[in-house]
Image (cartoon, rainbow, N blue to C red):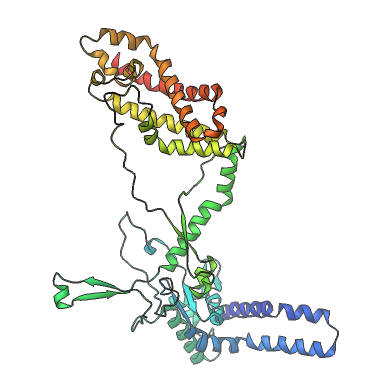
């Protein structure tokens, strides 16, 4: 059980640490100087600091001045505009969110943000004093739940201690009875009825910045991206070590609040250097049900297929570009080619599911007709088609077409290095394609033959 004396001891330790931090240079000067006048001057400064951080002196200033100069809250006005002087709000909704949404309700313990007079910011550190190490409860937690152990912890005078406690609680909770807005705050007029214009019937909403929520997201993303485990897993990709999954968050944007002075926005914003992450919210790229074919084309290995496979091709282009700077590219290149092969075979599978005999009306090469329209072998009058399909001589030609198509795309992308894409690369692409193509064909033959 926590007692008032234990809380007071923690506060005294905090103030002593603040004094030593502020007087560190003075103590160093005192050790070096031998001049009596200089020694007296330094000791006077140290005594002044000791008096400032004495329990009764500092708590009086904290409760009567600092508590009025800082605005605490989970949702802040300055996050919307750095010059906004409206109230911050300490708020947590009790409503459960739908599974498709995230919000501060999902965070077990929100960290309070603060802004105002920079000289009063030590009050925020004061509220963060860890009182209960076992249960991880700070002084702020005790104040917000109005724990009985706070009685008499701020002063021997119980009445004065109670006044300090109320002042601290009011600072933390904010003034919800008469909240204030400011001309720099944004306003949204919410329509209350279908005749809102005629009746002037609106509710004025003042959006605030969810600073505590965005701070939690910032820390979570940083932990995921830059933790030692994730860093090691990334490095192991290029080493002969156990491969583990790692987290990658592409297309992550950063917005900066407060410009060069994020401390003018809030304490948490300052800790983040003003940076706030924006997850990609791009419109989805819808792919068509299958690759579009024209009746006159003689192959599917063309620019349309390249567009369908653009995600894999982009990765391959990046790997090839990196190879000119770094020799460790074989693994990324193999991953990219495998992705391209999978995407090509997905398109082939969709064409294979078309009505049997569809290829009769197309000018595709015979090897591709055998591959993409295997059900045609079951039709009457297609004995020759069935025979050619089962002989499997056409498979080698399909492999060659894939390898030639991919090499041509690379030569087009890197015209100055066309000589780099030789028979070696051609055979490498063909090998990747052959392995997965044969796997697909084994399943296919069970259905057709």
- Nearest the eye: 33 or 412: 412
* In this rendering, position of residue 212 left or right of residue 192: right
Residue 424 horizontal/vertical position (percent): 56, 23
Residue 373 horizontal/vertical position (percent): 29, 20
- Nearest the eye: 366 or 27: 366
Question: Looking at the image, can residue 1 be seen?
Answer: no
Q: How many labels were placed on the picture?
A: 0
> Residue shown at 40%/33% (left/top)?
306
Identify the image quadrant of the C terminus: top left
Question: Looking at the image, can residue 386 be seen?
Answer: yes
* In this rendering, position of residue 41 left or right of residue 87: right
**Residue sitting at the far front:** 416
Q: Compared to 261, does 407 lie above or below?
A: above
- Nearest the eye: 251 or 324: 324
- Nearest the eye: 327 or 422: 422
Residue 385 horizontal/vertical position (percent): 29, 11
> Residue shown at 25%/16% (left/top)?
376
Q: Quadrant of residue 271?
A: bottom right
> Residue shown at 37%/31% (left/top)?
305
Residue 293 horizontal/vertical position (percent): 29, 28
> Residue shown at 42%/55% (left/top)?
279
């Amino acid at each position: 059980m926590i007692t008032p004396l234990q809380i007071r001891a923690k506060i005294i330790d905090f103030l002593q640490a603040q004094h030593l931090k502020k007087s560190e240079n003075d103590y160093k000067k005192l050790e070096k100087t031998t001049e009596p006048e200089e020694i007296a001057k330094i000791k006077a400064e140290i005594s002044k600091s000791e008096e400032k951080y004495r329990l009764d002196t500092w708590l009086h200033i904290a409760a009567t001045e600092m508590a009025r100069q800082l605005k605490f809250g989970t949702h802040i006005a300055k996050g919307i505009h750095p010059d906004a002087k409206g109230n911050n709000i300490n708020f947590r909704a009790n409503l459960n969110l739908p599974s498709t949404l995230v919000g501060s309700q999902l965070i077990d313990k929100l960290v309070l943000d603060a802004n105002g007079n920079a000289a009063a910011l030590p009050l925020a550190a004061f509220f963060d004093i860890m009182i209960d190490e076992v249960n991880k409860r700070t002084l702020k937690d005790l104040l917000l739940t109005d724990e009985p152990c706070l009685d008499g912890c701020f002063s021997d005078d119980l009445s004065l201690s109670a006044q300090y406690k109320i002042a601290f609680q009011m600072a933390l909770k904010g003034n919800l009875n008469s909240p204030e807005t400011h001309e720099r705050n944004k306003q949204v007029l919410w329509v209350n009825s279908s005749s809102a214009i005629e009746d002037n019937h609106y509710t004025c909403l003042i959006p605030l910045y969810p600073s505590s929520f965005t701070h939690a997201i910032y820390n979570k993303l940083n932990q995921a991206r830059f933790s030692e485990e994730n860093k090691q897993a990334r490095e192991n990709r290029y080493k002969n070590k156990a491969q583990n999954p790692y987290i990658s968050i592409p297309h992550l944007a950063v917005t900066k609040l407060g410009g060069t002075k994020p401390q003018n926005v809030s304490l948490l914003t300052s800790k983040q250097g003003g940076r706030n992450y924006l997850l990609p919210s791009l419109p989805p790229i819808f792919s068509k049900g299958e690759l579009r074919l024209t009746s006159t084309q003689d192959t599917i290995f063309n620019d349309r297929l390249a567009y369908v496979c653009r995600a894999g091709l982009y990765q391959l282009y990046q790997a090839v570009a990196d190879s000119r700077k770094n020799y460790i590219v074989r693994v990324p290149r193999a991953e990219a080619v495998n992705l391209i092969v999978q995407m090509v075979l997905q398109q082939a599978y969709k064409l294979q599911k078309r009505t049997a005999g569809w290829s009769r009306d197309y000018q595709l090469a015979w090897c591709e007709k055998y591959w993409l329209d295997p059900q045609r072998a079951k039709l009457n009058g297609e004995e020759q088609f069935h025979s050619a399909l089962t002989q499997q001589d056409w498979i080698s030609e399909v492999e060659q077409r894939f390898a030639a198509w991919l090499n041509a795309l690379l030569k087009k992308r890197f015209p100055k290095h066309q000589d780099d894409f030789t028979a070696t690369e051609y055979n490498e692409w063909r090998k990747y394609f052959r392995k997965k193509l044969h796997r697909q064909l084994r399943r296919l033959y069970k259905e057709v033959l």
